[in-house]
Each structure stands twice: as C-alpha cells, then as structure tokens.
Image (cartoon, rainbow, N blue to C red):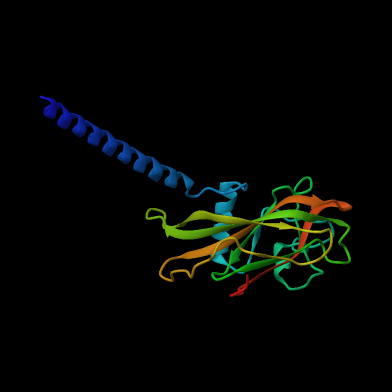
C-alpha cells in the first residue's frame, strides 16, 4: 500500500515539475518576443521611418529635427554636415526648447569598434549654440523583411547596447569604444547596424538649439 502511494506521489511531482518547466519556457519565450522592436527613449514609429530611409541610402543619416533659419537654405544645418569632415559646419536640432532627446540615426558599418563625436557649432560659433554635455549612443541590429501582401519592407530591430559620451565645454573630439561587438553581417539577408545619438544634457548657448559638428566611425583592432 505504501509503495503504491509512493509511486503515485512521485508521478504527481514529476507532472508538476514538467508543467512548471513548460510554463517557465513559455514565459521566457513570451518575454523574448516582447523585447523585439522596442526602442529606447525615441518613439518607435519615428524610428521605423528612419530605418526605412537609411535602408534606401545608408550614406544619409536621419535626424528627429533640423533647425531652419529665415534667410538660409533648408540644408544649412542639415544632419549630413556632421559627416563632411569639416569641423566648422554642423547639424543643429530644431525642436522647441534645448533639444532634450533629439536624436540622429546613422548607418554603422559592421566591424565598427569606435565612434568619435565633436560637440558644438565649430570654433567660430561654439558659444552661440547649445553644446552637448551628455549624449547616449544606442546600437541596434536591423533586419528588413518584405511583407507578402504589400511587398513593402518592414524593419525588425533589436537593441544591442548603449555607450555614454560626456563632453567638456570645448570643441574637442570625444572617442568611445562601443560596448558591443558588431559581427560581420550575412550577405544573404538584408541586415545592417544603426547607431542612434540621443541628446540628454547640454551646455547653454546664446541660441536655444543644440549642435554637433562631427561624427566619425572607425575600426581599431587590438586596442584595450
């Protein structure tokens, strides 16, 4: 009698453990699904549109806003000024206020190990515009999948990590090693990496628009 009850008890315990393990796996899988296509700070819809633009032309970064002044061309403070290797040209955000959480999304070549940022509006106008004091650099991996019904691309993205840039109030380059490694991409798939610079704190200037002069990427191996 005792042996029969012992066997029944063991069977019940095994069923409970198996059920619990199955529930835990489903919960873990559910959590993993929820983490997909989640942005940090910036709105998902805006980011999705930016990814589609980057997919069309990886050479052109996308900004959340750009300052347009009367009497100057719309591209005078354009975001591509950050990539022209001219420290006296610059991008300036055009949002109301000092530009908290204003962002720039740009193509990040696979193999990139370091990113350099020069804050401000060049030496001549440095004190006129706001200058970044702290910015985040978020890294995403992006996969483009074509919708079977519409035949349009839909980006799927995963947040990989964040580096923090802190600047002194000078037009000096700050260089940071990425916190994540960017593996070589599979050519058979439409995939790419994206960096997103997000303004978090600034030094105040005469005008309430925050500017960045230069942004550069590089691959340096064997460096500590």
Q: Nearer the viewer, residue 75 or 165?
A: 165
Residue at 84% across / 58% down in the picture? 169
Residue 52 percent across, percent down from the top left:
54, 59
Q: Quadrant of the N terminus?
A: top left
Q: Is residue 116 above or below residue 137?
A: below
Residue at 60% across / 46% down in the picture? 43
Residue at 71% across / 54% down in the picture? 135
Residue 57 percent across, percent down from the top left:
58, 67
Is 35 on the left or on the right of 85, as rendered?
A: left
Quarter of the image where one finds residue 221: bottom right
Q: Nearer the viewer, residue 120 or 113?
A: 113
Q: Is residue 37 above or below residue 125?
A: above
Residue 143 percent across, percent down from the top left:
47, 60
Q: Nearer the viewer, residue 15 or 133?
A: 15
Residue 154 percent across, percent down from the top left:
47, 55
Is 28 on the left or on the right of 71, as rendered?
A: left
Is 12 on the left or on the right of 48, as rendered?
A: left
Q: Quadrant of the C terminus?
A: bottom right
Q: Nearer the viewer, residue 171 or 149?
A: 171
* Outermost residue, front side: 2
Is 157 on the left or on the right of 212, as rendered?
A: left
């Amino acid at each position: 009698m005792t042996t029969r009850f012992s066997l029944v008890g063991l069977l019940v315990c095994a069923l409970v453990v198996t059920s619990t393990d199955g529930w835990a796996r489903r919960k873990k899988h559910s959590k993993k699904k929820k983490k997909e296509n989640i942005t940090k700070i910036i709105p998902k819809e805006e980011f999705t549109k930016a990814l589609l633009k980057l997919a069309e032309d990886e050479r052109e970064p996308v900004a959340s806003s750009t300052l347009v002044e009367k009497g100057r061309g719309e591209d005078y403070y354009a975001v591509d000024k950050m990539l022209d290797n001219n420290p006296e040209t610059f991008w300036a955000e055009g949002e109301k206020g000092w530009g908290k959480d204003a962002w720039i999304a740009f193509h990040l070549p696979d193999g990139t190990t370091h990113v350099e940022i020069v804050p401000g509006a060049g030496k001549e106008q440095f004190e006129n515009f706001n200058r970044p004091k702290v910015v985040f650099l978020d890294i995403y991996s992006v996969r483009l999948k074509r919708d079977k019904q519409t035949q349009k691309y839909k980006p799927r993205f995963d947040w990989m990590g964040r580096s923090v840039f802190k600047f002194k109030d000078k037009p000096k380059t700050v260089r940071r090693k990425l916190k994540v490694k960017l593996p070589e991409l599979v050519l058979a798939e439409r995939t790419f990496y994206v960096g997103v610079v997000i303004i978090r704190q600034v030094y105040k200037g005469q005008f309430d628009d925050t500017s960045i002069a230069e942004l550069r990427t590089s691959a340096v191996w064997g460096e500590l």
